[in-house]
Image: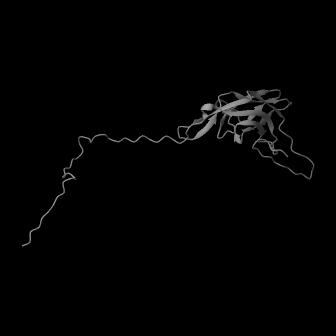
């Protein structure tokens, strides 16, 4: 059995001979299939990869009943988040004959260059049946840089402040000698 790109599979054994029905939504992928990622860094120093291309999952309800489902999108072993502007759509509710488009925010924790399978499944499906779409991932040439967090600047005063106490002592090059005379 071939497990999709860094994915997993579930096996269900039944003595009754019935398997749970899949979520009855058709799934399509809109957008480019050649995705070029660049390495980014959060203000806190955490690195990740992002792709500016637009990619969206299209769900269509071709049944005569309303369907509510929670789709999960994975790529290269990462869960792909949806665009923040559409976060209030979860779970997705579709009336009969309705089609919605769910924009993805292509931000991944790791990227392996080459061909991969973008995977979509539904949380409501106990077997997590996967619909896959071939995509190719690459890194932009400017994606390699030092990911160590920048060191904080240290202020080193170049002169003593006027209010600082001053001390005087003999220069280190002139030793002090004490002579003791016997009584």
Where residue 38 appears, as percent x and y from the top left, is 62, 33
Q: Quadrant of the C terminus?
A: bottom left
Along the line of sight, the residue nearer the viewer: 153 or 79: 153
- Which residue is outermost to the left? 183
User: How was this image coloured?
Assistant: one colour
Question: Could you tell me if residue 102 is visible in this image?
Answer: no
> Residue placed at 52% from the left, 41% from the top?
149
Where residue 39 appears, as percent x and y from the top left, is 61, 35
Along the line of sight, the residue nearer the viewer: 102 or 112: 112
> Residue placed at 81% from the left, 29% from the top?
60
Name which quarter of the figure residue 86 lies in: top right
Relative to 101, is 128 above or below? below
- Which residue is outermost to the right? 17
> Residue placed at 72% from the left, 29% from the top?
34
Along the line of sight, the residue nearer the viewer: 179 or 24: 179
Where residue 80 appears, as percent x and y from the top left, is 69, 37
Question: Could you tell me if residue 138 is visible in this image?
Answer: yes
Name which quarter of the figure residue 157 lies in: top left
- Which residue is outermost to the bottom? 183
Q: Judge from the rendering whether residue 172 lies leftward or rightward of residue 107; answer left or right.
A: left
Where residue 173 appears, as percent x and y from the top left, is 21, 53
Q: How many marks?
A: 0
> Residue placed at 61% from the left, 34% from the top?
143
- Which residue is outermost to the front? 173
């Amino acid at each position: 059995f071939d497990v999709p790109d860094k994915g997993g599979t579930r096996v269900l054994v039944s003595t009754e001979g019935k398997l749970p029905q899949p979520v009855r939504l058709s799934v399509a992928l809109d957008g480019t299939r050649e995705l070029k990622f660049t390495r980014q860094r959060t203000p806190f120093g955490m690195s990740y990869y992002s792709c500016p291309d637009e990619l969206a999952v299209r769900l269509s309800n071709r049944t005569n009943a309303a369907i509510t489902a929670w789709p999960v999108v994975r790529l290269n072993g990462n869960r792909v988040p949806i665009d923040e502007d559409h976060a209030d759509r979860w779970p997705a509710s579709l009336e009969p004959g309705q089609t919605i488009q769910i924009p993805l925010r292509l931000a991944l924790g790791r990227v392996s260059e080459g061909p991969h399978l973008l995977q979509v499944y539904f949380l409501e499906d106990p077997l997590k049946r996967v619909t896959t779409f071939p995509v190719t991932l690459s890194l932009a040439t400017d994606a390699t840089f030092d990911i160590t967090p920048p060191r904080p600047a240290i202020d080193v005063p170049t002169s003593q402040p006027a209010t600082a106490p001053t001390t005087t002592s003999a220069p280190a090059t002139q030793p002090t000698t004490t002579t003791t005379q016997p009584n």
